[in-house]
Image (cartoon, helix red, strand yellow):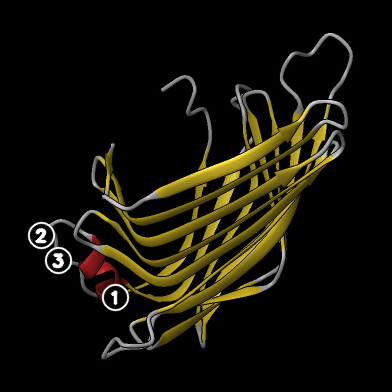
Amino acid sequence: VDIAPDSRISGNYYPAVHEFSLYADFPSLRWKHYLHEGLAINLASDDSTAKLETASRMFEAGSRIKLENLNLEAYAVRDEFGYNLNWDNKGSDRLNLGNMSGQADFQYRGKHTIPRIMLRMDPGEVIIRDTSWQLAASEVIIDSSEFRFDDFRVSHEKQILEIEGIISENPEEKLNLSFSNLNLAQFNDALNGMQLSGIINGSSTVSGIYEN
């Protein structure tokens, strides 16, 4: 971890009332190929709730992902978690921004050491290079080695990607993917030298991945 000079970290802990607070300010913070510039962190918690707020002037992950004015608000109340994530590359030649939010419930059951996690994603939007992608409300349930996708849908005008079904150790369970008018060339910027072209329509089914 590389921490810039003039970084500040402060906090308080009150054991009698189980309250904890932390504030951090980093001109820059790098870990491996992840870089934050102008990162501020606020964390506050007591015996039942926790709230986290972070703001980063710029976040980079390698050479292909750059998000500006990145903000995260998250909370945890007992067995529930919620988040709101947004960014806006205001100075870019092409519009890049996003707004995503959702909640998660952790369900502990008897002898199971790992909780069942229900992830609910709210409707959202991600704009990549002036192209707006709409995220539909959806749900993902994680239960040990099982992943259930309900109503996952990403769309831009007539381009649609849908995911529905289950990934599990049961080879009879299936994950269904549906593509409609999906332009493959728009993914080239995210690929390392690979160039795709064409429009894809159709569907695909995935099963038995734990066996393969």
Please name the amino acid that badge 2 sits on: Gly
Q: What crowding class fits label 2: few (fewer than 14 Cα within 10 Å), some (14-19), or many (20 or more)?
A: few
Identified at 79% across, 13% down, the residue is: 112
- Location of residue 102 with respect to 8 vertically, above or below: below
Side (left or right) of 68 relative to 106? left
Please name the amino acid that badge 3 sits on: Gln
Q: Element at badge 2?
A: loop
- Location of residue 173 with respect to 73 vertically, above or below: above
Q: Quadrant of the N terminus?
A: top left
Dot 2 and dot 1 residues touching (CB under 8 Å): no
Q: Which residue is mark 3?
A: 195
Q: Which residue is mark 2?
A: 193
150 or 47, nearer to the observer: 47
125 or 12, nearer to the observer: 12
Identified at 23% across, 46% down, the residue is: 33
Please name the amino acid that badge 1 sits on: Gln
Q: Which residue is mark 1?
A: 186
- Location of residue 101 with respect to 34 vertically, above or below: below
Q: Element at badge 1?
A: helix
- Location of residue 26 with respect to 10 vertically, above or below: below
Dot 2 and dot 3 residues touching (CB under 8 Å): yes
Side (left or right) of 47 relative to 96? right
145 or 71, nearer to the observer: 71
Q: CA distance from mark 2 to mark 1?
A: 13 Å
Q: CA distance from mark 1 to mark 3?
A: 10 Å
